[in-house]
Image (spheres, rainbow, N blue to C red):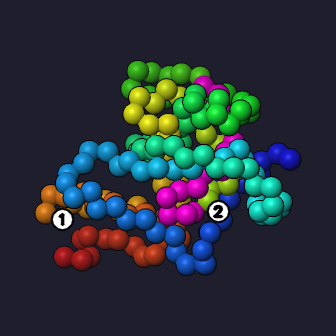
Amino acid sequence: MEPTPFGPILEFVTDMAAVITIDYGKRVYSIETTCKVSVYHDVVRLGNDNHPEFFEYNAIWDTGAVRTVISPKIVTDLGLQPRGKVAMYHANGVSYVNTYFVNLLLPNKMEVQILQVMDGNLPDADILLGMDVIGLGDFALTAPQGKTLFSFSQPSQYAIDFKKEL
């Protein structure tokens, strides 16, 4: 079975909106959570029977990244096979890296299926969640009383427009 060419497929573990909120209680400079990864599996076509096991890793949410990156550790742990190569543009130039297909289970229990990811060396986490995942829902970062509050919801709940709220 080959992955769909139409992009990632979403499955909601619950019938309601999948939401995560983290109140860090202080100012933080990176949004870090856990995230689970499995070998890709098309639940829509194959159902949940025999879904590959998910493994939990540390993740950083990065709105400056276009695509999601996984570490070589995940590639090894899951026995992933490269599906191609792409150019990865970063602060030091460009690198040509392998791509893989995986399923992600976000902390809000939303499963992103058949997501194409790139491999890369990540110093502080095993997953860097890029805009390909973040853009699937509502991402909010606020700092009431100087303390970081992070929320992510899928499906989108409503438009957040601070100017209109003034």
Q: Nearer the viewer, residue 104 or 79?
A: 79
Q: Count all numbered tags in the image, as a single digit.
A: 2
- Which numbered tag is attached to residue 10? 2
The percent coordinates of residue 80 (x first, y second) are 71, 34
**Left or right position of 154 against 111:** left
Mark 2: amino acid? Leu
Residue pictured at 51% horizontal, 43% vertical: 57
Q: Is residue 29 visible?
A: yes
Q: Mark 2, residues whose alpha carbon is within 10 Å: few (<14), some, or many (≥20)?
A: some
- SS at mark 2 in the image: strand
Residue pictured at 62% horizontal, 68% vertical: 12
* 127 over 90 or under it: above or below: below
**Left or right position of 38 against 71:** right
Magenta range: 97-110
**Left or right position of 52 against 89:** right
Reading the chain from its start, which is encountered first: label 2 or label 1? 2
The percent coordinates of residue 73 (x first, y second) are 57, 30
* Tag 2 and tag 1, C-beta contact below 8 Å: no
Quarter of the image for residue 78 reads top right
Examine the residues drawn in magenta and state their main secondary structure. strand
Q: Quadrant of the C terminus?
A: bottom left
Looking at this rendering, what residue extends furthest in the right direction? 1
Residue pictured at 40% horizontal, 73% vertical: 159
Magenta-colored stretch includes residue 105 = yes
The percent coordinates of residue 125 (x first, y second) are 44, 37
To which residue does mark 1 refer?
A: 144
Mark 1: amino acid? Pro
